[in-house]
Amino acid sequence: MKFLRKIDRKTPKDRTLHLIADNYATHKHPAVQEWLAKHPRFNMHFTPTSASWLNMVERFFYKGSAPAYQDLIGGAIDGFIDPVLGVMSYHKSGMVRVVAVTSRDRLPSMPDVPTVAETVPGYEFYSWYGLWGPSNLPADVTRRLNAAVNEALASDLRTRLAEQGYLLSPGTPEDFARFQKEDMVRSAKIVAEAKIRAE
């Protein structure tokens, strides 16, 4: 409780603080619950993982990655999550250290960086890009566009994109539609289980 009181005193009152407990007994302890009830800007979440070092996360909101990297390099924040494309140049220059990637496997462009799954088994999350057209796009045009994209991904462009951290997945329009549907189901499950709400 001394730790919580210290954080409460040192943190601006307009900030919401999120605490992560990896121990259910701590999460539900009467003294902890009573203290949290009197301090509504603190939220505690139970996360049954081995990441016991992660005891508090304070959220900051940025309008883009550039100001976040400025604060990270300047020491104003301890870290943040960003697509690998944004961090690659900072990582190669040594200005920041990539702690882990959230993909299932290590990235060929950063083989020395572990995955989160190496600490939290089963963890996988990623951002991805695709190419869409209007719903009434003729099938023959869809096929021609798909063939052109696959051809481009098989050229030297593949090497250049891989160096930037991209993992390429060429395929058919049906492959992409299936992937998108499965990803939406997976994301909906995460949102429902974590009770995530728009703020």
Image (tube, grey):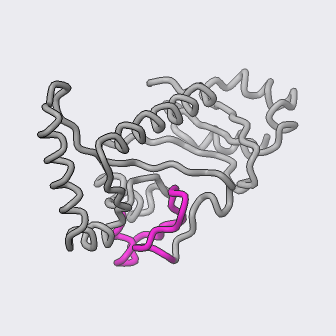
Coordinates of residue 99 in the picture (x, y in percent): 53, 65
Query: Where on the picture, by quarter, is residue 166?
Result: bottom left
Q: Main secondary structure of the magenta part?
A: loop
Who's the residue at 45% across and 24% down the image? 198
Q: Which residues are magenta?
A: 87-111
Query: In percent of the image, x 50 and y 57: which residue is there?
Result: 103
Q: Camera-side residue: 127 or 15?
A: 127
Is 148 colored magenta in this rendering? no
- In the image, is 65 to the left or to the right of 183? left
Q: Position of residue 5 (x, y in %)?
A: 71, 39
How far across and how far down the image is residue 127, in percent? Answer: 40, 48
Q: Is residue 52 left or right of residue 58?
A: right
Q: Residue at x 32, y 59 (%)?
A: 86
In the image, residue 96 sits, relative to residue 42, either above or below, namely below
Determine if the magenta segment contains residue 97: yes
Given residues 136 and 79, the one toward you in this image is 136
The answer to whether residue 136 is left or right of residue 129 is left
Q: Quadrant of the N terminus?
A: top right
Quadrant housing residue 199: top left
Q: Residue furthest front?
A: 140
